[in-house]
Amino acid sequence: MQSSRLSRSTLPKRRLERALAASGTLTLATAVALTGLTPATSSASSHREAPLTAGDPKADNTDVYAFTSPDKPDTVTLLANWTPFQEPNGGPNFYPFANDARHNIKIDSDGDGKPDTTYTWTFTDHVRDDANQFLYNTGVVKSLQDETLNFRQTYDLTVTDSHGNTKKLLDDAPAAPSNTGKASMPDYASLREEAVVPLPGGGQTYAGQASDPFFLDLRIFDLLYGGDLKERGQNTLAGYNVNTIAIQVPKKDVAFKGDDERNPVIGVWSTTDRKSTSVAGADSKGGEGSPAQGGKEARREDGMGNGADSGWRQVSRLGNPLVNEVVVPLKYKDAFNALAPENDATVTPVVDKVKDPIVPKLVEGIYGIKAPTAPRNDLVEIFLTGICKACGPIKADLNSQQLNADVDAGKFVPAEELRLNMSVPPTEEPNRLGVIGKDLGGFPNGRRLNDDVVDIELQALEGAAQTGKIVPALAAGDAVDTPYREPEGSFPYVALPNTAAVNKADSLQPDGGVSAGFGGSALDGGFPVVPVTALTGGALLACAGVLVLRRRRAERA
């Protein structure tokens, strides 16, 4: 691996080890109590990867992307997606953003696991005629202001600093609608353009539907492709849409002390907050630690300067892709989604599974590829500290906040964040394998829309970051190498949403299979065929065998 040109502040390795050793001070049960997580009020993220997600898909933030804008390299673009597996023909209500939640993108610029900048979008519904219409749109929609758009959403956007000071950036900005089809919205690109809103002081933002940029073959849950790697290669997410929130801002707006030249590394994650009426685990009689006694629950801030009595609770969280799927055991997934990054290194079960992950053992058991020896301090570096020479065994300086010249190394804490070194310029010819493909502009240094994070993380789990070499037997990964639709060249970069139905079984294989669709119903010789989809929460590979996915072939819109 090459190294960037940054100077770095040093942090003795033993300090990180002491921080990780403190994992016994906070159990996941305590994490649940501190965040107010209860089954009645919580959810989880990343394409339904945790048990409670299915009950609240609008709160499910699925992927986070962070990269230097290729066409505006003095800016950084941050994207987060919500509400996975949107079938394009899913009317009549389609897929609005949650109007009772806060959608956040958070930035940690000094490495303490706490947000220094938080952008928050809150949505409001507007219905022109709810007494006489059931339709989302009543005719052709050519503008976001058309009377034919019966349902529309607007949003407020605020930015909050590390001291809890909040400033409103946008008031009642328009969100792009769900794409209800070619007849209803023949020029969706113009609707998207109308929904790209400039920000005061520079930058722009977008909220609306997009083709899901994530790509992988989810039949990996079927005992690692049934023990036969020849059966890989079907993009399970092809044809589905997601709701995207994107923001592009000058790099100085998110850099530590506003200086992106001295302090170019940031950590990024997204969260969803919902209102809650009580604090789980608090003593309602006013015992020690209760709100009545001004205990920790009563004073705890939620990362936006709001105390616990504000009633907002984090119910979903995402930083690095696939962490909750492939690292966190099933028992702890929902609690992890309610945990603040500053507490990650104190949670023993999570740290243990980073240092001794489940996936390599499953791969060894099914395919005979020997698992690297634990403890996996290289994975601690990738997921919890960022990559730097002082951080662990990967001998390179790349994307840890400890490389920022003005950061106090003594306050650094290991935390699961998507870290980006904004000083690395955009790559002219990106490599889908990012850093392990010798492309420092890609994952895990931030994440671009074309980065093949499934193959990258599989290689990392199998030891490629330690050796600097691709594991040959797994070089093809899941054999899905690109998004269903290619990203666009300008903001918001995500591809336009799909309009063709994906819930069709192949007429030659009505029960599914590698080349067939899944979900919905189809007719074959007059007989109805109803392939059933069941994508439940659980860990990628860790829950292999729990989930059996039905295959489908998506039609390109």
Image (cartoon, grey):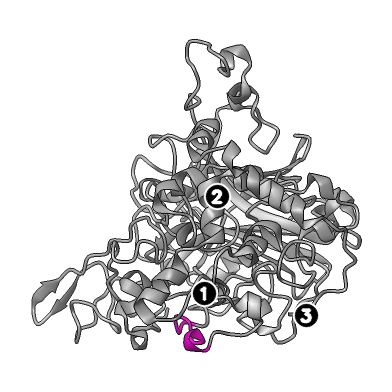
The residue tagged 2 is 317
Instruction: Give the residue at x 15% y 76%.
Output: 523
Q: Is residue 390 left or right of residue 29?
A: right
If you read the primary sequence from the N terminus, does the residue marked by circle 1 or circle 3 appear first? 3
Element class at badge 1: helix
User: Is-magenta flag for residue 132?
Assistant: no
Q: Is residue 341 visible?
A: no
Circle 3 residue: 2
**Helix, strand or loop at disc 3?**
loop
Q: Per the image, is 477 magenta?
A: yes
Q: Which residues are magenta?
A: 472-480
Which amino acid does the dot numbered 2 rest on? Arg
User: What's the residue type where badge 3 is placed?
Assistant: Gln
Numbered circle sitting on residue 458? 1
Dot 2 or dot 3: first in sequence order is 3
Q: Label 1 neighbourhood size at 10 Å, few (<14), some (14-19), many (20+)? A: many
Where is residue 156? Give x, y as percent.
Answer: 64, 43
Whether residues under marks 1 and 3 lie with C-beta atoms below 8 angstroms apart, the answer is no
Residue reaching furthest to the top: 285
Counting other residues with Cα less than 10 Å from the Cα at mark 2, is it few (<14), some (14-19), or many (20 or more)? many
Residue 212 left/right relative to 330: right
Distance from disc 1 to disc 2, alpha carbons, whole Å, reads: 22 Å
- Residue 100 lies, with reference to residue 483, above or below; the image says above
